[in-house]
Image (spheres, grey):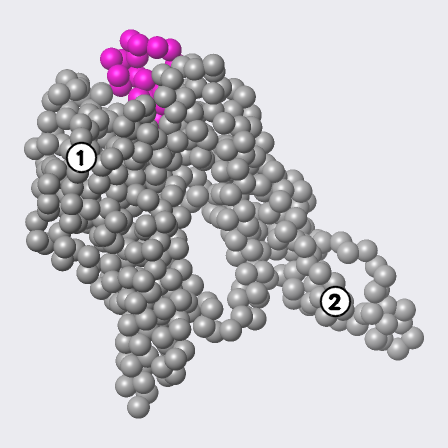
Amino acid sequence: MTSLLPNPGRTRDRGDSPGGTGDAAGPATPFPGARPLTLVALLAGALAAAATLTVCLALGVLGWFLVDSGAHGTPGEALRLASVGWLVAHGSAVTVQGSLVTLVPLGLTALAAWTTWRAAVRSGELLAGHGPDVHRLGDGERDWTVLVASTLFAAGYVVVAVVTVVLAATPGTGPSTVRAIAGALALSLLVGAPGIAVGSGRAALWVSQLPPAVPAAVAACGRLLVAVAAACGVTVLVAVVLAFDDVVNVFARLHTGTGEAVTLVVLCLVVLPNAAVYAGSWLLGPGFAVGTQTLVSPGLVVVGPLPLFPLAGAVPAGGGTAPWGIAALAVLPVVAVWAVSRALRRHPTTRWDDGALRGCAAGLLAGLALGLLAWLASGAVGPGRMTEIGPAPVAVVLHAVPALGLGGLLGGLLATWRHRRATA
C-alpha cells in the first residue's frame, strides 16, 4: 500500500533536521506517476457498467438473428430489448405487453457484480499512491481516498444507467429510472467500494486493526455461501435430470427450431441463479411460489398451470413429496458444519468460546445473505398468477438463520477441537 509507506525522498522532514524548517505546511500532492483520482474512478465506474451492457447488447443481437434469422423485428429493437434486460438486472421494473416484470435475472446481476469488482480493484490499484502517507497519517490527517473514489465510481456507473434508461425507454416498456439508479448505486457501493479498498491496500490495513474473530467469521461466511451455492446447484441439476422428459416436452410444445432452442437455453442460464435460490429455499423448508396461491416445499406441493419455460418443467407435480424430500432439510446444516470447519482451519483458535462465536457468526451472516438473495430472486413475471414468483424472503431468513447458525456453531467447535488436538 504505497500511500501509507514512508516516502524515500522524505527521510528528514517536518523540521526534525537540525535547523530545518520542515515541510509540514507543504501541499498534499500525490506521489510521482499517480493517476488523476477523478478521471480514474469515473472512467472505472462507467466502464464497469458499459462492459456488461455491451455483453447484453451482443446477446440481444445474437438472439434476434437466431430467431428466424432476424426475420422478425429490427436490430434496433433487439438492442433496445437487450438494454431493458440490462436495466432489469439492476432492479429496474419494466412493462412487457402491459404486464409489470420485477423479477431480477440474477445471472446478469452476478455478471455485473463480477465486472464491477474487477474494475474497482483495478482502479484501486491505480489510486494506491493517492492520499496521505504514513507521516501525515501519524499527524492525524484523515484518508479520504476510498470514500472519494467510491463516490466517483458510483457516479460513473449511474450516468451509464441513466443514459441507458433514456435511450431504451418506450411507452410500452417504461423502465423505472429511480429503481435503475438505486440498483446502480447499490452495486457500486456494495461491490465497487470494497473492491477499491482492496485494490488500494486500505482494506488490508483496516482488517489488521480488527479483532481476529471478525475476519475469521467473514471468511467462513464466504466459504459457507460458496458451499451452499454448490449444494443448491446440485439440487437444481437433480431436479432437471429427474424431470428431463418434462423439460424436453416444453421445447416440443413450443415448436422451437435450433435458433429458438439456443435462445431458450441462454435464458435458462441467465435465471439459473434464481433457480438455485429457489432450491435453497426448498432445502431450508419454506419452499417457493410459482404463482399466486401456490407452494413448492419438501412437505407439500400445490401448483397450477405453469408457463412454458424449460426450468418450469423441473417443478414437481402437485401433492405430497417423497420421504427423501423431508430428509433434504438436513442438507444445508450439514453443509454448514463442513464448510465452516474447513474455513476456520486458516483461522485456528484453541478457545472453545472463540471457535463457537466465529462459526455461529458465519452461519448467521450467511442466513441473512440468503434472505437478501431470496428478495432479489422474487418478483413478478407477468399478469394474473405470475405476479408472485419465488420464495418469501422473511421466511427464508427465519429458517436460514437457525439452520446455518447451528451448523456454523458445530463447525466452529469441530475446527477448535481439531486444532486443540493437533497442538496437544
Q: Which residue is mark 1?
A: 303
Q: Are marks 1 and 2 in contact (CB under 8 Å)?
A: no
Most foreground residue, 357 or 236: 357
Quadrant for the C terminus in the image: bottom left
Main secondary structure found in the magenta portion? helix
Q: What residue type is disc 2 on?
A: Gly
In this picture, residue 173 sits left or right of residue 158: left
Q: Which residues are magenta?
A: 58-75
Quadrant for the N terminus in the image: bottom right
Q: Where, by quadrant of the figure, is residue 209 drawn?
A: bottom right
Is residue 363 shown to the viewer in this render?
yes
Q: Which residue is mark 2?
A: 140
Q: Secondary structure at mark 2?
A: loop
How far across and how far down the image is residue 409, in percent? 32, 71
User: Where residue 183 is drawn, which disc sits there?
Assistant: none
Q: What residue type is disc 1 on?
A: Val
Residue at the (30%, 39%) spot, across then down: 390
Mark 1 vs mark 2: which is more N-terminal? 2
Most foreground residue, 95 or 141: 95
